[in-house]
Amino acid sequence: MAMSARGKRVCRQWALDWSGGQAVPTGHDMFVHDELGRPDHLMRSFVFGVVGFVALFFTPLAAQATTLAKVKAKGYVQCGVSEGLAGFSEPVDGVWHGIDVDLCRAVAAAIFGDPSKVNFTPLSAAERFTALAKEDVDILSRNSTWTMTHDIQKGVNFVGAYYYDNQGFMLPADLNIRSVLELSNAKICVGRGTTAALNVQDFFNDRNMEIELVEYDSHKVLQADYEAGKCHAYAADISRLYSARQSFAEPEKHIVLQDTISKEPLGPAVRTGDEVWFDLVKWVMFALINAEELEVSSANVDQMRESGNSAVRRLLGLEGDFGSSLGLDRKEYDGNDWAYNAIKAVGNYGEIYDRHLGPEGVVSIPRNANQLWSKGGLLYAPPIR
């Protein structure tokens, strides 16, 4: 306490306990008293007004329905994917396939125990972040690059890197060009609204090399024009170039240069401001990576529930309450089975990669940086403990 110039004792320290989403005074008397110890009612009203304002400001945030609550209520996950990128997200006979698709199925399996409880919305590069921010989709799992601008200015949060990519160039083999430094005065086609256009401009401007940059709203139109010879080179993520090439009438007549000009960590994103949903999607992705490291697969996941390995037991919900802490418990569903259900449905990360991008996949891309850290790659997930 301290005496003010007007003879009033003022409590200098007080705090609010926000447990339960409510403001509750704690500690010492927070009111102002006069010299006889009587409360100053004017100041008392003021303090209650401040507390009320703060409570009104924060309580609605706590009371708002989270994405998880909305997903549970409607009974499915709405997943934003590409308009068609083989190996990542592509409809085949009305069924979506790809590594980005399988991540969304894993999230659905973690929530509902059923990987089929997901719908897919194809989105262009230009509309993807807006669709997520407007709640048209719950997850954006669409070969999107995790950059600072995307992460802090688009109203989204990236949950992590799901695929480590680089940007490169594809061009007709008969041009006899084997280095990006040989592309002076070339017409280079890129997708509008992607990091590719910015990377190409930076790379050639930094080297005082003249090029003609042509931007397309549709990758399908871009690919058709490139295949028809209207562009000297097609610039995009290496994964997209491999995917596009396999769709050409004569893929062997096109080469992807070994040169790369940027880092392109691709990953799923969710809306900013919903930590519950952010944590869930993030840990489902981490569970798939941890499962590969622990050699837990869709084929042996039931057998592995008998394992004495503590890390495996935590992953599969036999020790700890990790699924419950993610908010997944509900009537007739044990939330601690979240990772078990995800792995059972789509397999571990290695299985997902091999199914879509391995030697027998629709597009064959060497894993390289997408190997586990223990095998010389960059793939790494925090432990579940």
Image (cartoon, rainbow, N blue to C red):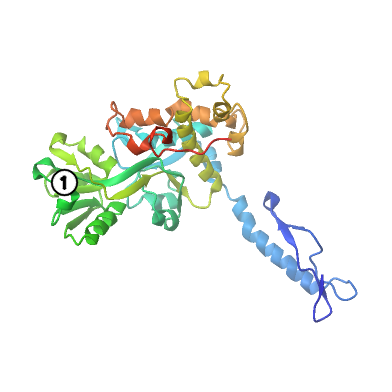
Whether residue 25 is visible, yes or no, is yes
| Image: 187 above or below 247 | below
On screen, residue 333 above or below 188:
above
- The answer to which image quadrant residue 203 occupies is bottom left
Quadrant of the rendering where the C terminus is positioned: top right
- Quarter of the rendering containing residue 48: bottom right
Please name whichever residue, 102 or 66, is drawn nearer the observer in this view of the structure: 102
Q: Residue furthest right?
A: 36
Residue 142, position as x, y percentages in the image: 36, 43
Q: How many marks?
A: 1
Is 101 left or right of 63, judged from the image as shown? left
Q: Would you identify the image quadrant in which residue 99 lies?
A: top left
- Residue occupying image coordinates x 30% and y 42%: 83
Residue 134 in view, yes or no: no
Vertical order, 384 against 197 (above or below): above
Check the image and name the residue furthest to the bottom: 5
Find numbered disc 1 in the image and state the secondary structure of the residue it sits on: helix
Alpha-carbon neighbours of circle 1 within 10 Å: few (<14), some, or many (≥20)?
some
Which residue is painted at 88% across and 76% down in the image?
35
Tell me where residue 27 appears, x and y as whole percent.
79, 59
Residue to which mark 1 is pinned: 226
Q: Which residue is at 54% across, 42% downward?
A: 68
Percent of width and height locating residue 282: 49, 41
Q: Could you tell me which quadrant the N terminus lies in?
A: bottom right
Task: Name the kind of residue labelled 1 in the image.
Answer: Tyr
